[in-house]
Image: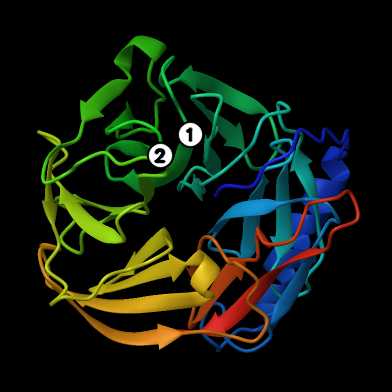
């Protein structure tokens, strides 16, 4: 989550093209009836547009993956079963970093150095709302959706931001945005701090990785008090995106080209490092999303100078 450029690429997607893309996803799901979602006929390597500079990934129930561009904020949708895809929403010229899709098909997108977040309709590509989360030092990095809203991290400030969402899906007014200072064990460091974010298995607290210290924290969403998760002495260097499935936490370790697998207790207070996943195709993966028995990770390729012709892809591994 360090490399960015100001490339602005103007692309337009007609509504018919988007409809076709989603229809392909639905058809693919139907053709795989009897096998679990994400199992079987999904692509192992999904090519992204040259120069795209991916960072975040999220996947909807039909098997469509959505990715944000660090270059200009474009949003790309790809069918996991065919690898085909298209830009569905043009960016604002500033990065799109972490993103998640909700049950209404809306993408909650972290805005990096802009200090903002926006909500995008995945069916039309329209920006539904934009929220200025902070006017201070900012790299709005990652986002997690909970039962009552969206939480965002800021890698340059010791605080989280919350967008409350009503039970019927109503988006908040700008005045409803909550800023939650991080306290307790959290000590802000030079460089990148709060990075990936997820919910604890019991859905009562948040997990945040601090990249600068390779430390995982449990954060009380009511108070901001952060406590270090006891991993039995294990650390998580190059910790980036987080994903919790059941009581299993996946931690992307970007420059390590590894995904740490941690078994958590229900409250997310303790955990045990039980596995480390890697793949020869990894080239600085940043975030992770699950579909069936597979994990999908975009290669950010931070060690490769970005150009308009630089190739990028999403890698599938078993989980």
- Above/below status of 39 relative to 199: below
Question: Is label 2 in a helix, a strand or a loop?
Answer: loop
Q: Is residue 105 visible?
A: yes
Say which mark, if any, is on residue 181: none
Q: Which of 236 and 131 is in front in this view?
A: 236
Q: How crowded is mark 2: few (under 14 residues within 10 Å), some or many (20 or more)?
A: many
Front-lying residue, 279 or 27: 279
Discs 1, 2 touching: Cβ within 8 Å: yes
Where is mark 1, residue-wise? Answer: 139
- Determine whether the residue tagged by mark 1 lies in a helix, strand or loop: loop
Examine the rendering and report whether any part of residue 166 can be seen.
no
Query: Does 183 appear above or below 260?
Result: above
Residue 78 percent across, percent down from the top left? 73, 60
Q: Quadrant of residue 20?
A: bottom right
Quadrant in which the C terminus is drawn:
bottom left
Q: Where is residue 196 in the image (x, y as percent from the top left)?
A: 39, 52
In this picture, residue 192 sits left or right of residue 47 = left
Residue lying furthest top: 175
Task: Tell me which residue sits at (37%, 71%) in the image.
Answer: 250
At 11% from the left edge and 34% from the top edge, which residue is drawn?
A: 222
Residue 151 occupies quadrant = top left
Whole-angstrom CA distance, mark 1 to mark 2, is 5 Å
Q: Does label 1 or label 2 sit earlier along the sequence?
A: 1
The vertical placement of 116 against 224, above or below, is: above
Q: Is residue 23 left or right of residue 116?
A: right
Residue in the picture at 78% in, 74% down: 82
Q: Where is residue 121 in the image (x, y as percent from the top left)?
A: 61, 36
Residue at 10% x, 33% y is: 223
* Rendering coords of residue 26 (x, y %): 68, 66
Q: Name the residue under label 2.
A: 155
User: Which quadrant of the structure image shows residue 199?
Assistant: bottom left
Which residue extends farthest front? Answer: 190
């Amino acid at each position: 989550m360090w490399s960015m450029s100001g490339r602005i690429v103007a692309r337009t997607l007609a509504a018919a093209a988007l409809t076709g893309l989603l229809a392909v996803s639905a058809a693919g799901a139907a053709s795989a009836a009897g096998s679990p979602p994400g199992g079987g006929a999904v692509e192992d390597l999904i090519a992204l547009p040259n120069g795209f500079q991916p960072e975040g990934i999220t996947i909807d129930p039909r098997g469509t993956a959505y990715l944000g561009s660090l270059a200009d904020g474009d949003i790309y949708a790809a069918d996991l079963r065919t690898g085909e895809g298209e830009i569905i929403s043009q960016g604002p010229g500033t990065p799109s970093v972490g993103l998640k899709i909700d049950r209404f098909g809306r993408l909650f997108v972290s805005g990096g150095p802009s200090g903002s977040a926006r909500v995008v309709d995945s069916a039309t590509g329209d920006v539904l709302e934009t929220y200025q989360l902070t006017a201070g030092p900012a790299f709005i990095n990652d986002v997690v959706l909970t039962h009552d809203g969206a939480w965002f991290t800021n890698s340059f400030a010791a605080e989280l931001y919350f967008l409350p969402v009503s039970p019927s899906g109503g988006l908040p007014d700008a005045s409803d945005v909550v800023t939650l200072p991080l306290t307790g064990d959290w000590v802000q460091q030079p460089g990148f701090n709060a990075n990936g974010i997820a919910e604890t298995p019991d859905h009562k607290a948040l997990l945040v990785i601090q990249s600068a210290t390779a430390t995982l924290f449990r954060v009380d969403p009511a108070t901001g008090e952060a406590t270090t998760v006891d991993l039995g002495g294990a650390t998580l260097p190059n910790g980036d995106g987080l994903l919790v499935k059941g009581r299993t936490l996946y931690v992307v370790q970007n420059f390590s080209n590894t995904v740490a697998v941690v078994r958590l207790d229900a409250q997310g207070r303790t955990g045990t490092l039980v596995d480390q996943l890697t793949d020869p195709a990894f080239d600085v993966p940043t975030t992770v999303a699950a579909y069936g028995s597979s994990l999908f990770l975009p290669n950010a390729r931070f060690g490769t100078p970005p150009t308009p012709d630089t190739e990028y892809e999403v890698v599938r591994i078993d989980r």
